[in-house]
Image: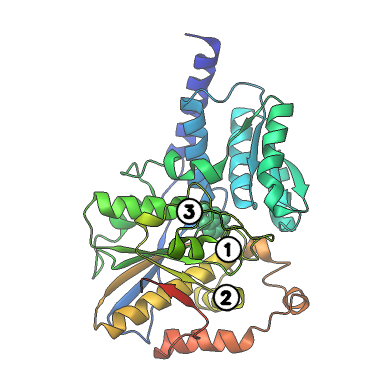
Amino acid sequence: MSDNRQWSREAIRIIEADFQRSADTHLIPLPLPGFAGIELYFKDESSHPTGSLKHRLARSLFLYALCNGWLKPGAPVIEASSGSTAISEAYFARMLGLPFIAVMPATTSKEKIAQIAFYGGQCHLVDDPTRIYAESERLAREHDGHFIDQFTYAERATDWRANNNIAESIFQQMRFEQHPEPSWLISSPGTGGTTATLGRYVRYRQHGTRVLCADAERSVFFDYYRTGDATLRLDHGSRIEGIGRPRVEASFLPKVIDAMVKVPDALSLAAMHYLAQRLGRHVGGSSGTNLIGALMAAQHMAQAGEKGSMVAILCDSGERYATTYYDQDWLKAQGYELSGLIDAVAATVERGEPLPASVLRANI
Ligand SMILES: *Cc1c(COP(=O)(O)O)cnc(C)c1O
């Protein structure tokens, strides 16, 4: 066996051993008093060892790269990221003894940068968020490393048929609930990889479940979904970390999505604060976006007289945003005024009142 094949074999053993030491993530019910007969659950991806749903993606991307023969001992791994993926990849790179460089927008939260450094990764910050891809390619060339490229490979690195992917895990955990087959799964797009896995899985397993994708304000995905125009571009990054992209990413697959909504950032953050109150702990901004997506689906079900369940993704914890989304001074400096919107979210959850009309929708 070649030296590199031998090294890859040991690297894969190390990653599989880490998986064996890990437990599944929890499914947490969130009662909706305003919607009788409709149950909402959050799939808590913050409980992974590296704190977000990107733990699954990083594991898949490393296994994919290893099995493709793309990694070699000593050669750096480089990634373009808004932070969460880089944290999880830094963890796996360190486990394999590989140098890791994260290319990120300069606006990435300090907490995330500190965590990447904690796992031995190096951060390369760029002022223009649309430059992260080109910078990653340049660094990979210059250091004879590998650009792991989540925005291209997220959808194909994950085993969508099963292998305890996020979809299979949800359906297993729902088995003894009142409505075991969810009417809706709700996820928000960064790479689009999670949505792709959910959408493909429910089709493959012939479930009636629909997939709702909840986009951020500063993002092209929603317009791409409606128009099919893959050339859409924005010149700024998203304010909801982890989701929303300034360009259409290859790993975002619109055809496996049944409905889409686009949530104003202030409403996502209001929903995040409301969810944090209800759960008794802080969650990230994209979990707020998903709560709004779930409430849109609940309104749709209630209008149609449907009963059933929904599962939304709780993507990461709020610890990463202590000095931003959970800091009143920061919110004020950014021009956010959330208290009225938090009351509006509470009125929807608790009394079934309509959400603010500012949420855009397609196919729902
Ligand atoms: C990446 C990410 C998402 C979106 O997941 P994808 O599978 O990349 O679409 C949502 N929230 C957070 C915090 C993320 O880091």
Q: Is mark 3 within 8 Å of ligand 1?
A: yes
Kindly identify which residue carries mark 1.
219
User: In the picture provided, is 329 more to the left or to the right than 177?
Assistant: right
The relative height of residue 86 versus residue 352 in the rendered view (above or below) is: above
Q: Earlier in the sequence, mark 1 or mark 2?
A: 1
What secondary structure is found at the residue carrying circle 2?
A: loop
What secondary structure is found at the residue carrying circle 3?
A: loop
- Residue 37 or 218: which is nearer the viewer? 218
What secondary structure is found at the residue carrying circle 1?
A: loop
Rendering coords of residue 89 (x, y %): 59, 41
Kindly identify which residue carries mark 3.
192
Q: CA distance from mark 1 to mark 2?
A: 11 Å
Q: Is mark 1 within 8 Å of ligand 1?
A: no
Give the crowd class for mark 2: few <14, some 14-19, many >=20 residues within 10 Å: some
Number of dots carrying numbers: 3
Kindly identify which residue carries mark 2.
264
Give the crowd class for mark 3: few <14, some 14-19, many >=20 residues within 10 Å: many
Q: CA distance from mark 1 to mark 3?
A: 12 Å
The structure residue drawn at horizontal position 65% and vertical position 66%, both measured from the top left corner, is 239
Tag 3: residue type? Gly
Q: Earlier in the sequence, mark 1 or mark 3?
A: 3
Rendering coords of residue 199 (x, y %): 34, 55
Q: CA distance from mark 3 to mark 2?
A: 19 Å
Rendering coords of residue 284 (x, y %): 58, 65
